[in-house]
Amino acid sequence: MRTIQNTLYVMTPQAYVHLDNSTVRIEVERETRLRVPLHHIGALVCFGNVMLSPALMHRLAEEGKSLVLLDHSGRFKARLEGPVSGNILLRQAQHRAALDPDFTLTTARAVVAGKLRNSRSVLLRGAREAADPGEAQTLTHCAESLAASLRAVPSAGDLDTLRGFEGEAARGYFAALNLIVKPQARAAFSLDGRTKRPPRDRFNALISFLYSMLMNDCRSAAEAVGLDPQLGFLHAVRPGRAALALDLQEEFRSVLVDRFALTLINRGQLSAGDFDEREGGAVMLNDQGRRLVVTAWQERKQEEVTHPLLDSKVPLALLPFVQARLLARTLRGDMDGYLPYLAK
């Protein structure tokens, strides 16, 4: 048996979310819009100015269900969690491993290798589906550059060098993504390099929003298996930074988020009208766009893929949890090294 945690997203400004016995009720202007049994909810995510009853917050904490607060554009603000769970021995092993330079570098190399391998598969798929032979050739050339970066990963003798390889490869990858956008959509969705805080174009706004939701899933996965989400191996430790969740996220960015964003764009499910341009050049999904993306994202996460290591079907929603468990097994010494998820 396997369980997919259901996440309830509340995006309506001024919505009031509270408990009615064991049912979560959402009201807008005193009108009930939704009732959901609490036991059907694995996590509650609130965008912007959403009001919550103290009783609901206490109940979520008691039952170990996450409450995540995001701003109106999807940026992470806070998370409410109950008592720290998991195995203290596992967390001790994680902290010891983080002090071991060899383990840290080896694990960080695996994370970067997974990211580059999956990014390359996105470009190669784009090359196969490209209508223009010249663009297909360019995408293939960029994929070969990623392959060269992938071969260089084992030679990185320290984390700074490894991060340099990863950063250089990412610049080439994001430059090539524009060629996977269908020509008729390029006027509205041209990726002008990777920009964030704030994103400067619609493509960046879309993937930034999706990366936020993916990071929340990776953080939940780390915590669910008893790992400390703040202590990573590739990403440096900083106050308030979920470094391990960011590590777990890397191998999924291209195959889960970027590929999904390209699908939304190329199928015409998103248009320029789903975004707002702000003063100063920032571009954000508007309310209509966020609803569309969240709905499609939840549907997408129910799709299944074959996990190459488990050799069995796994819903996309559970991939971060599977990888977090593999990392936990590595830290316990049950596996020789961490193996990232590699998409076919």
Image (tube, rainbow, N blue to C red):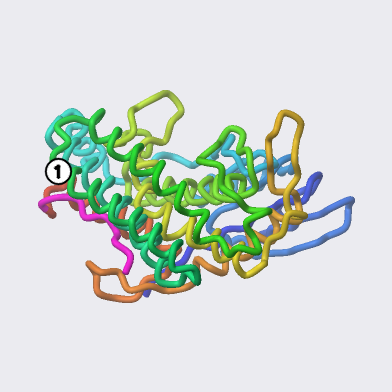
Q: Position of residue 287 (x, y in %)?
A: 75, 51
Q: Residues within 10 Å of mark 1 (few under 14, many from 20)?
A: some
Nearest to the observer: residue 34 or residue 129 = 129
Report the side of 60 relative to 46 (left or right). Answer: left
Looking at the image, residue 118 lies above or below residue 98? below
Nearest to the observer: residue 226 or residue 306 = 306
Q: Which residues are magenta?
A: 336-344
Nearest to the observer: residue 39 or residue 194 = 194
Q: Secondary structure at mark 1?
A: helix
Quadrant into which the C terminus falls? bottom left
> Is residue 112 one of those drawn in magenta?
no
Residue 67 in view in this figure: no
Q: Position of residue 106 (x, y in %)?
A: 16, 41
Quadrant of the rendered image containing residue 277: top right
* Residue at 34% from the left image edge and 38% from the top image edge: 168
Quadrant of the rendered image containing residue 304: bottom left
Provide the major secondary structure of the magenta segment. Answer: loop
Residue 196 in view in this figure: yes
* Residue at 60% from the left image edge and 52% from the top image edge: 44
* Residue at 27% from the left image edge and 47% from the top image edge: 111
Quadrant into which the N terminus falls? bottom left
Report the side of 18 relative to 267 (left or right). Answer: right
Nearest to the observer: residue 273 or residue 90 = 273
Looking at the image, residue 280 lies above or below residue 108? above
Report the side of 239 relative to 104 (left or right). Answer: right
Residue under label 1, please give it: 154
Q: Amino acid at mark 1?
A: Pro
Q: Position of residue 121 (x, y in %)?
A: 34, 62
**Total residue callouts:** 1
Quadrant of the rendered image containing residue 9: bottom right
* Residue at 36% from the left image edge and 55% from the top image edge: 119
Report the side of 309 relative to 60 (left or right). Answer: left
